[in-house]
């Protein structure tokens, strides 16, 4: 029998529906692989018993002809999504021992459609990081290595566990979240596809909050079709999230076949950064050429405010985080460090429970919101944000999509960027504008660099332009024909 | 703008994060580095620009002002306190705050 973990999510789904194999077999195959993936540190928790029960129930449904859209498909869930009865820790010490009594809407939607959950995936603490090194569980290791070397590389972050698990075939697809690039950057660094949808397309209910005006859930999967299938299930209108948008969810898989003929695709000239590796520039040009060959019109566009997007982000996101994370006070959930004085109890609990990067961001957030600085920093940032969003909207008057690189480098070594916070923050330079403006973006594998590491290209669309964006992504994917796989060094 | 040690300690107090001297010292440099980098926003002309409050142009939805017994409403005191470090009869227990 073929190794079921080599099938794409779409093929697995179709084979299950045709009873070519069972959900129990597929789940066992993935669990076996996941159990033998220790060196990657992608899973923080496998829920094997529950997964086998779910698979059995799926097989019964398929047997009765009652299969649902994702019936029996084994997925991994980023440990930022609350899962009913399964511990959810956001890779933070402060949430040790927390077991939600409810299900996030996104994971609930996937369950409703029949998916099997294999376990919870590692991430940067509270999704704050671009390398997975801030996780209380230790970093995830990228399945990809530089050719001929055994240096441990980062899979990117914050959805590093999701990206590594998909790249190493430890699940058929994974949920992820993106606040400044946390889906698209790790997807780029692991040769996978990641979609950050329009803000409000997926409900935030039950996702541990980081920066509420920027957070958005999306899939990481092996190809564009798989990601589109997952997004169709994940997206919904949800009265439990007041920023969720009441708008019908299209079948994104059906949008893929459209091609790019007649589409106008913009190349923002300000994204050509000084010191960017020439290989990235070359792949970017190649991506544009391939789209042009298929009938798209390529035009240069200008987004002069691009350089201000990251500084805006590093005011807005920490400010919202400092407010959101005020809830971790040692009273209602998670860890508590006791003191007879309530203020000391709060401070000691938070001092013990949060890691260095989370503390750094909470300090920045508290500072920019404090008396005397609110106008100079926070309010100014929100006004610059508006200008950036308006500038992007104006460009979208003239083009259907933007094509950019996904990240400024391929996968980097552990510790290589963690000594300088700003250098780490620059990882999101190409992705963060989409979060500030609330528009969708997708990262597609573009090829390998000279070291044999994957690089990604990003397509960005106007709000609710997912269908045209995925048409572009599917066309790009087909033209590039990326089929490289990491060698399986982690299997002992 | 430069953050001195006293300011960093004050911000830590406002954020309710207990920090040792070993943590405070490197933070002074790191926070100043980040704030200096953010400072470039001062050069953007924002005259007449309103602050962004929502990235998607929709009005907040309204709902009937009724108590519903689902995840958004009441009726689940056991679940509410299920993860608390210390509880009694569905109350959160904290140190005495009023003498």
Image (cartoon, coloured by chain):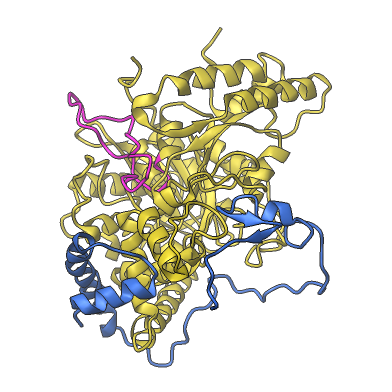
Chain colours: A yellow, B blue
Is A5 magenta? The answer is no
Q: Is residue A140 above or below residue A49?
A: below
> How would you classify the magenta stretch by its main secondary structure?
loop
Task: Find the residue positioned furthest to the bottom.
Answer: B48
Q: Looking at the figure, which quarter contains the C terminus of chain B?
A: bottom right
User: In this view of the protein, which residue sits in the foreground, A196 or A342?
Assistant: A342
Q: How many marks?
A: 0
Task: Find the residue positioned furthest to the top.
Answer: A1
Q: Position of residue A354 (x, y in %)?
A: 38, 55
Q: Position of residue B2 (x, y in %)?
A: 19, 80
Relative to residue A413, is residue A462 drawn left or right? right
Residue at horizontal 20 percent and vertical 33 percent from the top: A451
Q: Position of residue A277 (x, y in %)?
A: 19, 48
Query: Quick check: can you spot residue A128?
Result: no
Residue at horizontal 23 percent and vertical 61 percent from the top: B23
Residue at horizontal 38 percent and vertical 48 percent from the top: A124
Is A149 magenta? The answer is yes
Q: Is residue A9 above or below residue A36?
A: below
Q: Looking at the figure, which quarter contains the N terminus of chain B?
A: bottom left
User: In this view of the protein, which residue sits in the foreground, A430 or A210?
Assistant: A210
Residue at horizontal 47 percent and vertical 68 percent from the top: A342
Q: Is residue A310 above or below residue A152?
A: below
Query: Quick check: can you spot residue A11?
Result: yes
Boundaries of the magenta span: A131-160
Q: Position of residue B61 (x, y in %)?
A: 72, 72
Please identify the quarter of the rendering in which residue A366 is found.
bottom left
User: In this view of the protein, which residue sits in the foreground, A487 or A115?
Assistant: A115
């Amino acid at each position: 029998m073929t190794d079921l973990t080599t099938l794409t999510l779409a093929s697995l789904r179709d084979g299950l529906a045709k009873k070519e194999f069972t959900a129990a077999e597929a789940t066992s195959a993935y669990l076996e692989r996941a159990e033998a993936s220790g060196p990657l540190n992608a899973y923080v928790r496998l829920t094997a018993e529950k997964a086998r029960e779910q698979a059995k129930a799926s097989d019964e449904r398929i047997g009765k002809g009652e299969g649902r859209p994702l019936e029996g498909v084994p997925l991994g869930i980023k440990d930022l999504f609350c899962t009913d009865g399964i511990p959810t820790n956001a890779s933070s010490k402060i949430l040790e021992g927390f077991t939600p009594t409810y299900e996030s809407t996104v994971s609930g939607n996937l369950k409703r459609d029949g998916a099997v959950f294999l376990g919870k995936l590692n991430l940067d603490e509270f999704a704050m990081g671009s390398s997975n090194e801030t996780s209380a569980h230790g970093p995830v290791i990228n399945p990809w290595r530089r050719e001929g070397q055994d240096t441990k590389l980062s899979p990117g972050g914050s959805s590093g566990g999701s990206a590594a698990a998909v790249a190493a075939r430890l699940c058929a697809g994974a949920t992820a979240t993106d606040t400044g690039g946390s889906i698209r950057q790790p997807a780029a660094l692991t040769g996978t596809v990641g979609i950050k949808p329009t803000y409000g397309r997926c409900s935030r209910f039950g996702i541990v909050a980081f920066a509420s005006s920027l957070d958005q859930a999306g899939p990481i999967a092996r190809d564009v079709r798989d990601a589109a299938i997952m997004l169709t299930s994940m997206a919904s209108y949800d009265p439990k999230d007041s920023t969720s948008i009441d708008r019908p969810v299209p079948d994104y898989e059906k949008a893929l076949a459209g091609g790019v003929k007649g589409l106008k695709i913009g190349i923002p000239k300000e994204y050509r950064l000084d010191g960017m590796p020439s290989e990235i520039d070359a792949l970017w040009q190649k991506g544009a050429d391939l789209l042009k060959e298929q009938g798209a019109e390529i035009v240069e566009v200008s987004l002069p405010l691009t350089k201000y997007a990251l500084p805006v982000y590093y005011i807005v996101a920490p400010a919202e985080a400092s407010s959101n994370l005020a809830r971790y006070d040692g009273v209602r959930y998670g860890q508590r460090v006791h003191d007879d004085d309530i203020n000391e109890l709060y401070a000691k609990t938070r001092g013990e429970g949060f890691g260095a990067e989370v503390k750094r961001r909470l300090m920045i957030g508290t500072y920019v919101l404090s008396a005397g600085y609110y106008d100079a920093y926070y309010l100014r940032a929100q006004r610059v944000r508006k200008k950036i969003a308006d500038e992007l909207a104006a460009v979208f008057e003239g083009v259907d999509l933007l094509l950019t690189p996904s990240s400024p480098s391929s996968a980097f070594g552990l510790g290589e960027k963690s000594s300088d916070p700003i250098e780490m923050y620059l990882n999101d330079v190409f992705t963060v504008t989409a979060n500030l403006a609330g528009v969708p973006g997708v990262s597609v594998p573009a090829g390998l660099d000279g070291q044999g590491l994957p690089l990604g290209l990003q397509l960005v669309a106007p709000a609710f332009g997912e269908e045209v964006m995925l048409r572009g992504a599917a066309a790009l994917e087909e033209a590039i024909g990326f089929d490289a796989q990491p060698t399986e060094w982690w299997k002992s | 703008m430069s953050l001195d040690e006293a300011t960093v300690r004050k911000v830590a107090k406002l954020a309710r994060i207990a920090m040792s001297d070993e943590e405070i010292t490197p933070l002074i440099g790191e926070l100043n580095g980040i704030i200096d980098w953010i400072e470039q926003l001062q050069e953007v002309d924002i005259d007449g620009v309103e602050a962004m409050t929502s990235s998607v142009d929709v009005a907040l939805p309204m709902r009937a002002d009724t108590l519903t017994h689902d995840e958004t409403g009441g009726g689940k005191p056991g679940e509410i306190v299920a993860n608390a470090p210390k509880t009694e009869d569905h109350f959160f227990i904290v140190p005495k705050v009023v003498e």
